[in-house]
Image (cartoon, grey):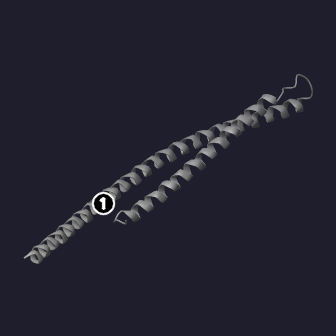
Amino acid sequence: MKTRFTSLVHVKKNIVQKSERLLQQSNANCNKATKALEESLLYLEKIRLPSQGKIADFLANRTLLDTQRTLIQHNQEWLEYTKKEVEQAKEQLKCDMIEYEKYKYLEYEEMQKALKEIQIQEAKELDEIALMTHTNKKKEAS
């Protein structure tokens, strides 16, 4: 049974599904950022400082350490950004779900109201048929 809210419920359902996909994508980005941070931290642990050798080796190693620390900082910032993105997506999904549920409830109430009207109309018709049948039986009996 269609109501005036049916099309709105359909639209809101599509919006909720879109929000769910966005949340999944945000979670995937967060997982990628976490993995990238872990990998960069592991790589930093693998870098060994030379205890002897040429100054160029020391400088190259120092540059490698600085680069890795910069990468770690970048990955930490990326992780924080993706965590905020996930929180925003969760909030948006929550709002969209509330809107969807509101319209779904309104549609349900509208359907219940229409069904009640149909039942009342059917009861009136049955009463009318019963009255006609009763009247016809009286006429036939007379």
Q: Position of residue 34 (x, y in %)?
A: 66, 38
In this rendered view, identify the residue nearer to me: 127 or 47. Answer: 127
Q: In the figure, 51 relative to 15: above or below?
A: above
Three-letter residue code for mark 1: Glu
Q: Secondary structure at mark 1?
A: helix
x, y (%) of residue 142? 7, 76
30 or 57, nearer to the observer:
30
Q: Nearer the viewer, residue 14 or 64?
A: 14
- Horizontal side of 58 relative to 9 (left or right) equals right
Q: Residue farthest to the right?
A: 53
Q: Residue at x 36, y 62 (%)?
A: 5
Circle 1 sits on which residue?
110
The residue at the point 84 percent across, 27 percent down is 48
For the N terminus, the quadrant is bottom left
Q: Nearer the viewer, residue 122 or 83?
A: 122
Residue drawn at 59 percent across, 39 percent down: 80
Q: Quadrant of residue 30?
A: top right
Within 10 Å of disc 1 (Cα), the crowding (few <14, some 14-19, many 20+) is some
